[in-house]
Amino acid sequence: MDDSRPTGTDLVRQIVVISTVVFMIIAAMVGTGLFGGTNVRDLQGGALDADATVLAPATPAFSIWSLVYVLMIAYTIWQALPGQRARERQRRAGWWIAVTAVLNGAWLLTAQFLTLALTVLAIVVLLAALGATLRVLVQTPAETWGDRLFMDATVGIHLGWVSLATVANITAWLSAEVVSPMDADRQQLWGVIVLVVVALVGIAIAFGTGGRIAPALAMSWGLVWIGVARTSGEPHAPAVATAAFVVAAVILISAVVATLRRRVVAGSIGD
């Protein structure tokens, strides 16, 4: 544990994290229509709904947001404890986590009040911020179970889900406003191609983070629900469903292999 003394900046960081997560929660309430607005599924002409494109996950997939919010709230409470104030890991990652909270809320408000194209910009920026945050955490190894749960798991699940949500968001925008309508066969072809890219991204995250399981679990969760949606709902796309299930398995296996590889390397260094 760090033994440096707390500073005024440390206290400011804790307050900023609390404020940004509160903003994120309020934005989520607005974005889901709790305050009388339109639910996300019905925004932008339904372009973000589960049946909008062949890469849209089934509705139950989005329940993972509840887990993300619970973990973010738990992190907010934990990082506010006096013992966390002067820790170097909090100093390095806390500001980044605050940024991701703001961007998370910003995407919801963008979807509610602005355009579909701007939702793409908002989610891409959120994805970049989450990637930068996880990189900081990888470079500053966890020391306690709290680090692993409240920081690594929180950011990892957030990143994994947003990685897949970015693909779905971009596809929704292209289908609604950019690309001419395609027949079913072409939709499936492009859906499979995009899922191959998702597999490469998932593999890169797995090996780039030394086998962090949280991003892989979140990505696989979304991919499985894409497969379910394409087999049980519309648009029906069995090739996309098969590809989604296979990619989910590939990403999980990659995370396991990357973990084993990291442990072998660490063991070799220890010897």
Image: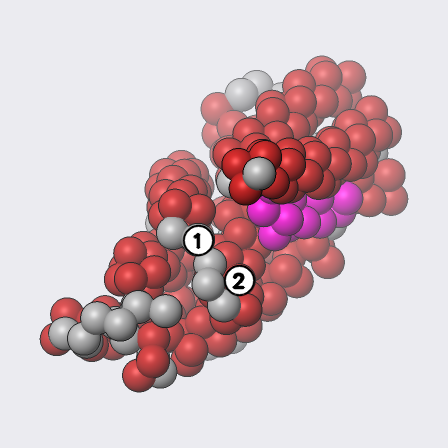
Picture quadrant of residue 181: top right
Query: Where is residue 174 drawn, in percent x and y?
Result: 52, 28
**Residue at image point 80% right, 31% down:** 246
Mark 2: secondary structure? helix
Who is closer to the viewer here, 93 or 25? 93
* Region in magenta: 210-225
Q: Look at label 2 and name its amino acid.
A: Arg
Percent from the top left, x then y, of residue 9? 14, 70
Image spot of residue 114 (x, y percent): 36, 49
- Which three-letter amino acid code belongs to the residue tagged 1? Pro
* Residue 83 part of the magenta segment: no
Q: For residue 221: magenta?
A: yes
Q: Nearer the viewer, residue 89 or 74?
A: 89
* Residue at screen point 58% across, 46% down: 212
Closer mark to the observer between disc 1 and disc 2: 1
Left or right for 21, reference 206: left
| The N terminus lies in quadrant | bottom left
Q: Is residue 210 left or right of residue 187?
A: left
Considering only vertical position in the picture, is 8 above or below 113?
A: below
Q: Quadrant of the C terminus?
A: top right
For image coordinates 12% across by 75% down, the residue present is: 8
Q: Is residue 242 above or below residue 7?
A: above
Asked whether residue 42 appears in the rendered view, the answer is: no
On screen, residue 124 versus residue 154, left or right, reads left
Q: Earlier in the sequence, mark 1 or mark 2?
A: 1
Magenta: main secondary structure equals helix
Residue 141's tag is: 1
Looking at the rendered structure, the secondary structure element under dot 1 is: loop
Q: Position of residue 138 (x, y in %)?
A: 44, 47
- Residue 204 in the figure: left or right of residue 247: left
Q: Which residue is mark 2?
A: 148
Q: Residues within 10 Å of mark 2 (few under 14, many from 20)?
A: some
